[in-house]
Amino acid sequence: MLDLATSMETDSRIAMIETDHEVVLRAPGWPGDTDFELVAFTPLGRTCEVVRAEELAADIGKALLILDKTRVLGDQKPDWYRRLELCADGVYPVRRGE
């Protein structure tokens, strides 16, 4: 699951964060100089991983390129594809094998 989070408290090793949906987790990779970060976690987990938005956008862009090159979806693009395409906009200047 993805959510925005803010730091609640930080000791010398692990930050405690709270997500926008009031989930409290340990965040070992939390940068000390930030107010909000995107985090990934399992709903029943106790820890999370900080996800950099630009890295996630690049990963989404790569996945879309693979889908385009393999033509798995053909010419019809479902709504979820278009939402992901918006997330990756600007990551790769050339898309769809051009």
Image (cartoon, rainbow, N blue to C red):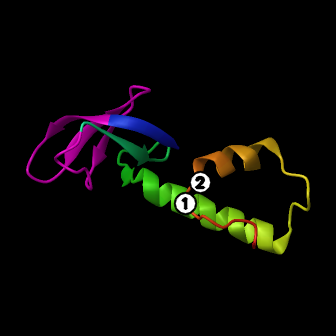
Q: Around disc 1, counting alpha carbons within 10 Å, would you say few (fewer than 14), some (14 to 19), or many (20 or more)?
A: some
Outermost residue to the left: 12
- Residue 87 lies in the magenta-colored region: no
Measured as percent of width and height from the top left, residue 25 is found at 32, 40
Question: Which stretch appears magenta?
Answer: 6-34
Q: Is residue 19 magenta?
A: yes
Type of amino acid at the residue the image marks with label 2: Ala
Judged from this view, the residue extending furthest toward the right is 75
Q: Which disc, if any, is residue 4?
A: none
Q: Secondary structure at mark 2?
A: loop
39, above or below 24, in the image: below
Between residues 2 and 75, which one lies in front from this camera angle?
75
Mark 2 lies on residue: 88
Image disc number at residue 91: 1
Q: Is residue 49 above or below residue 71?
A: above
Q: Quick check: marks 2 and 1 in contact, CB under 8 Å? A: yes
> Taking 38 as reference, is 73 left or right?
right
Toward which corner of the image does residue 98 lie, by quadrant? bottom right
